[in-house]
Amino acid sequence: MLKLAGLKKLYLMGETSVPALKGIDLHIRPNEFVAVMGASGSGKSTLMNILGCLDKPTEGSYLLNGKEVSHLNDDELSFIRNKHLGFVFQNFNLLPRYSAVKNTYLPLKYSAGRPEDGMDKAARMLELTGLAGRLHHRPSQLSGGECQRVAIARALINDPDIILADEPTGNLDSTTAHEIMALMRQLHERGQTIVMVTHEPDIAAYAGRVITLKDGRIISDSPTH
């Protein structure tokens, strides 16, 4: 499903070239749940940005469903993000004036089809994430865990091939964090492929495989126990 070969990323700082990724080789298969770990500056955020088609590598290959995406233009990358990828962020990124169901519906706003069908699907996604009774609440009326459930529902709305989760429990207390991870595991058991960045070993343990980065390289790649 996802294959990286010789992936490198350099950033220019004035006249100095700073390597963020130094040759990443990685293969993620359908229905895997992968956690990416590493200290600050290890390259994990850069890697996630490239996987999410939010940034382009300086060198190397990125195949998504067998298609080379590393050299596509911005419009083509935007299409892939909308149709094939779902994003879950640490800060939820919900629009405060919109209800839960409207926030969930947003990725469908410019898609073909009737808006009412999209709203029905948004309601189903919220039911799947345990928020059937909170459809019309705004983010200010929801707890942090509920806001993250809305964000997960929004990530699922386009039936993505892969969910990319960047520190999805970073703003949650430990009890709520484990509730969210239990939900992520349920989605994985339903067949969803998930790649998640986290710095917490107990959160990474929910995944089936843990990749650790250091100084822009993969230093370990092993199944969880």
Image (cartoon, grey):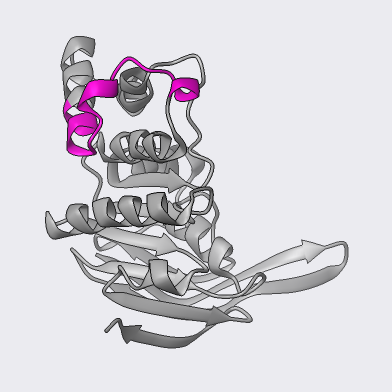
- Residue 130 drawn above or below residue 54: above
In this image, 124 relative to 53: left or right?
left
Report how many numbered discs are placed on residues in the image.
0
Q: Residue at (45%, 50%) from the top-left corner?
A: 72
Using the rendered image of the protein, determine whether residue 37 is visible from the camera's viewpoint. yes
* Prevalent SS, magenta region: helix
Q: Which of 102 and 148 is in front in this view?
A: 148
- Residue 93 drawn above or below residue 219: above
User: In the rendered structure, does residue 149 fall within the stretch colored magenta?
Assistant: no
Q: Residue at (54%, 68%) from the top-left corner?
A: 44
Q: Which of 134 and 60 is in front in this view?
A: 134
In this image, 18 relative to 181: left or right?
right
In this image, 196 relative to 115: left or right?
right
Q: Residue at (49%, 49%) from the top-left corner?
A: 172
Using the rendered image of the protein, determine whether residue 70 is visible from the camera's viewpoint. no
Question: Which stretch did the figure color magenta?
Answer: 124-141
Q: Position of residue 224 (x, y in %)?
A: 30, 81
Q: Position of residue 12 (x, y in %)?
A: 77, 63
> Residue reaching furthest right?
14
Q: Position of residue 41 (x, y in %)?
A: 67, 71
Q: Which of 1 and 94 is in front in this view?
A: 94
